[in-house]
Amino acid sequence: MTGKRRHRNCHRRRKRVNSRCAQARLRFPKSCMNHLLREGHYSHRLSSSTPDFLAAILEYLISSILELADNEARNDCRKRITPQDVDMAVCNHPELSRLFRNASISQQEELMIPGFQSLPGVLEASSQNQNFSQLR
């Protein structure tokens, strides 16, 4: 035969391109973690594995918090997780409550901590803002 021979390699399937998150088997974006670390000026030099490590830690913390909040919601026979469920899950867990002792959960009307007495001026101001927004 005088024709050209076909190479066996021409019919190979192309390799699927994986993102850095898929390679590390993480759900949090590695590039976003890298950007936040560089933007925060936490160090002059960063290792290439630093964003992986931070993403893995955040993924572990979020999954454990959501699991505990899901248990709180199921105890109340509800299917949706509310900010109160997240707050109760964090408060009831000793290590998480120590870690998040200075954090505040957004979209929460009142703190659910036993023995906590809220300031009367804060609640009155928030109720006045709600009444003002209803008048518009």
Image (spheres, grey):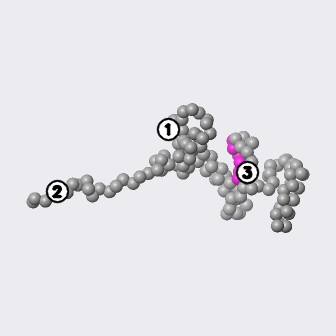
Asked if residue 97 can be seen in this view, the reply is no
Quarter of the picture containing the C terminus is bottom right
Circle nearer the N terminus (1, 2): 2
Circle nearer the N terminus (1, 3): 1
Callout 3, which amino acid?
Ile
For residue 48, the mark is: 1
Quarter of the picture containing the N terminus is bottom left
Q: Position of residue 20 (x, y in %)?
A: 48, 47
Q: CA distance from mark 1 to mark 3?
A: 32 Å
Residues 39 and 85: in front is: 39
Residues 47 and 74: in front is: 47
Q: Position of residue 52 (x, y in %)?
A: 53, 42
Q: Is residue 1 magenta?
A: no
Total tally of numbered discs in the picture: 3
For residue 14, the mark is: none
Q: CA distance from mark 3 to mark 2?
A: 68 Å
Q: Is residue 22 left or right of residue 75?
A: left
Tell me where residue 85 sits by quadrant.
Answer: bottom right
Q: Is residue 80 left or right of residue 22?
A: right
Q: Residues within 10 Å of mark 3 (few under 14, many from 20)?
A: few
Does 124 appear above or below 134?
above
Q: Tell me whether the residue at label 3 lies in contact with that at label 2, contact meaning CB atoms closer than 8 angstroms.
A: no
Residue behind mark 2: 5
Residue behind mark 3: 105
Q: Which residues are magenta?
A: 86-96
